[in-house]
Amino acid sequence: MSRPFVVSIAGFDPSAGAGVLADVKTFEQHQVYGFAISTANTIQTENEFVAIQWTDLDFVLQSVQTIFNTYDIKAVKIGIVPSLAFLKAVVCLIKKLSPQTKIVWDTVLKSTTNFDFLIIENQNDLVDVLNELELITPNYDEILKLDLKENSIDIITEYISKNCAVLLKGGHHPTEIGTDYLHTSNQFFKLESKNAKIHPKHGSGCVLSAAITANLALGQELLTACKNAKSYTENFLMSNPTQLGYHYVP
């Protein structure tokens, strides 16, 4: 097959606005072949989060093993996970099976209705995980939860970017809404929004991280992958006025 293989390891959202369904839609539009491994089954709509049932870790690891033993996976996007230990086990197995596979972690720590998914219990474990990742994509609320010392956003971002790149999303920025900042180990880049008139969407963060993952699998450099993914996500946000967006490449 001519298309690169990518995997989404994330939750199942019946509304298809977020999680593995949204990721696979995004992968398809980017001309990569997407696989999906579910970390959780959820009951939700675009407006309400009702319940979650986590997938057993051994089941997820067996699925990872099966996929990676069969296909050459270029990149992986990871979404919601129940614990840092769960995330670490998945990441370590991926790197054991395919050290060259690039991993993007969309740091979804809670739902928009304040249902907590993951709490950082151990900073050393977090650093171990970050060292294996290509990129994390927190917003301004999520990055504060990635540090146990309750430091400022600038200090946390500088600390994390020494281990892996950080795309700090601007959707919750108090003054620069829509402006993202990509931080690497020695520099940062400002990614401004090209469209001021957008409609908020359920799962926009999932779409962005999945688009970046697809672009990395296609061989794009990190900055280019993030810029192109941002453009794709803005088209997604402008696709209609509802919470559920349409996927297409203009």
Image: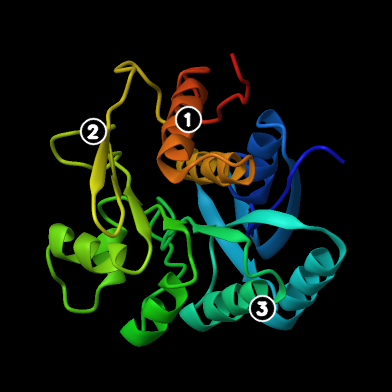
**Residue named by callout 1:** 228
Assign a secondary structure to mark 2: loop
How would you rate the neighbour count of disc 2 (Cα within 10 Å): few for under 14, some for 14-19, many for 20 or more?
some
Point out the tag, 2 or 3, that comes first from the N-terminus. Answer: 3
Give the label, 1 or 2, closer to the camera.
1
Marks 1 and 2 close (CB-CB < 8 Å): no
Query: Could you give the CA–CA distance between mark 2 and mark 3, rounded to whole angstroms?
Result: 39 Å
Q: Up-down: is 184 above or below 177?
A: below
| Residue 106 in picture, x, y percent from top left | 47, 55
Left or right for 44, reference 158: right
Q: Which residue is drawn at the image coordinates 63% and 21% (left, top)?
A: 248
| Nearer-the-camera pick, 29 or 238 | 29
Q: What is the three-letter code of the residue carrying label 1? A: Asn
| Nearer-the-camera pick, 130 or 233 | 130
Q: Which residue is drawn at the image coordinates 63% and 61% (left, top)?
A: 101
Q: Which residue is drawn at the image coordinates 55% and 27% (left, top)?
A: 245
Quadrant for the N terminus in the image: top right
Assign a secondary structure to mark 1: helix
**Residue named by callout 2:** 177
